[in-house]
Amino acid sequence: MSIALGAGIAVLTGAGAGIGIGIATSKAADAIARQPEAKGDINKALLLGCALAEATAIYGFVIAILIIFLLK
């Protein structure tokens, strides 16, 4: 029971990453709408931020898998 609870909590990092990527994308769209000439710089920063946020979700998933299979 506690193993499943720990794995479930570890997987919740995906929700945080999804929210973060959504907020970052909306802010980038607003920034591009205000300054279309800065689109390239904004896209670079957005992609870097999304990659870092997605990495945290993947780390949480890996931790959940490790909890399930190594703590049996």
Image: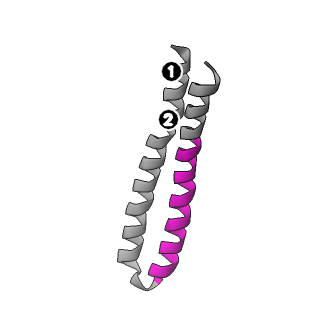
Disc 2 element = helix
Q: Which of marks 1 and 2 is nearer the N terminus?
A: 1
Report the disc number at residue 11: 2
Position of 67 relative to 17 (above/below): above
Q: x, y (%) of residue 22?
A: 40, 55
Report the disc number at residue 39: none
Quadrant where the C terminus is found in the figure: top right
Disc 1 element = helix
**Based on the displayed image, in which of its 4 quarters is residue 45 positioned?**
bottom right
CA–CA distance between discs 1 and 2? 10 Å
Nearest to the observer: residue 51 or residue 28: 51
Residue for point 47% across, 42% down: 14
Residue for point 39% across, 82% down: 36
Nearest to the observer: residue 12 or residue 65: 65
Which segment is the magenta one?
38-59
Q: x, y (%) of residue 39?
A: 44, 80
Looking at the image, residue 47 sits to the left or right of residue 33; the answer is: right
Residue type, mark 1 in image: Leu
Residue for point 44% across, 41% down: 15
Residue type, mark 2 in image: Val
Position of 47 relative to 37 (above/below): above
Q: Does the magenta stretch include residue 11?
A: no
Report the disc number at residue 5: 1
